[in-house]
Image (cartoon, rainbow, N blue to C red):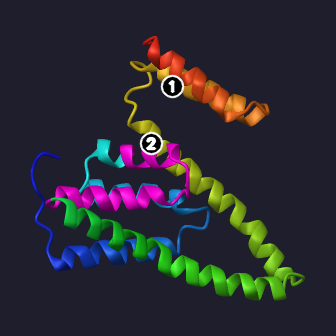
């Protein structure tokens, strides 16, 4: 983004409360809420560009550490777009508090309760019922990230690499670092 955003306090509260609400939907991890984050941050508010959004996820997933780091990078980028280092640090604080407070509190209390009641049929049913929801949210996240690659007919080598990689991960026990190395070589040679 080339222009500086002018975020008022109401905008920062809106960012905080949006991440607060997404926190309770992150049943498969924060990454499962990426489609709604994209809708809010890129499409609705225009606080991030598509490339900033995708880079936030890619950098955080490549870095060692918790999966939720991409939320901090999104807050960082919103703050940078709003005017520099201090807003960027504030963006990290706002986004991370918003995404971590509700889910951490709920997880703490719910895990204590479910552990004490783990033999109840309703607890077992709830755990089994959440699996398809998590899978659907992960597929939606993958679709958002994949759609940034462009048209399948034009960028077919990239799409083919994605499909082959997904099949290898699904059907074999090949370590992911080998697949990353293969992807890096394909990119280095300009094949994808």
Q: Nearer the viewer, residue 133 or 99?
A: 99
> Where does the image place residue 28, in percent across and percent down from the top left?
61, 62
SS category of the residue bearing label 2: helix
- Asked if residue 57 can be seen in this view, the reply is yes
| Residue assigned mark 2 | 145
Examine the structure image and report whether residue 66 is included in the region drawn in magenta.
Answer: yes
Q: Nearer the viewer, residue 128 or 111?
A: 111
Residue 154, placed above or below residue 97: above
SS category of the residue bearing label 1: helix
Residue 76, placed above or below residue 110: above
Instruction: Identify the magenta region.
Output: 54-83
* Residue sitting at x 46%, y 37%: 146
Marking on residue 159: 1
Q: Main secondary structure of the magenta part?
A: helix
- Asked if residue 45 can be seen in this view, the reply is no
> Where does the image place residue 142, in percent across and percent down from the top left?
52, 44
**In the picture provided, is 169 more to the left or to the right than 40?**
right
Q: Residues within 10 Å of mark 1 (few under 14, many from 20)?
A: some
* Residue sitting at x 26%, y 53%: 48
- Mark 2 touches mark 1? (CB < 8 Å): no
Quadrant housing residue 14: bottom left
Q: Residues within 10 Å of mark 2 (few under 14, many from 20)?
A: some
* Residue sitting at x 19%, y 79%: 10
């Amino acid at each position: 983004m080339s222009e500086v955003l002018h975020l008022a306090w109401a905008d920062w509260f809106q960012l905080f409360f949006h991440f607060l609400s997404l926190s309770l939907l992150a049943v498969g991890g924060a990454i499962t809420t990426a489609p709604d984050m994209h809708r809010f941050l890129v499409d609705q508010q225009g606080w991030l560009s598509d490339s900033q959004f995708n880079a936030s996820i890619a950098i955080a997933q490549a870095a060692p550490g918790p999966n939720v780091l991409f939320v901090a990078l999104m807050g960082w980028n919103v703050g940078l777009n709003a005017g520099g280092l201090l807003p960027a640090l504030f963006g990290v604080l706002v986004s991370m508090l918003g995404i971590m407070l509700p889910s951490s509190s709920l997880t703490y209390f719910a895990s204590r309760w479910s552990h004490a009641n783990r033999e109840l049929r309703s607890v077992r049913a709830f755990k089994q019922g959440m699996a398809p929801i998590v899978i659907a949210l992960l597929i939606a996240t993958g679709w958002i990230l994949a759609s940034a690659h462009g048209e399948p007919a034009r960028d077919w080598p990239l799409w083919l690499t994605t499909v082959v990689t997904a099949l290898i991960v699904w059907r074999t026990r090949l370590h992911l670092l080998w697949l990353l190395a293969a992807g890096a070589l394909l990119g280095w040679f300009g094949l994808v």
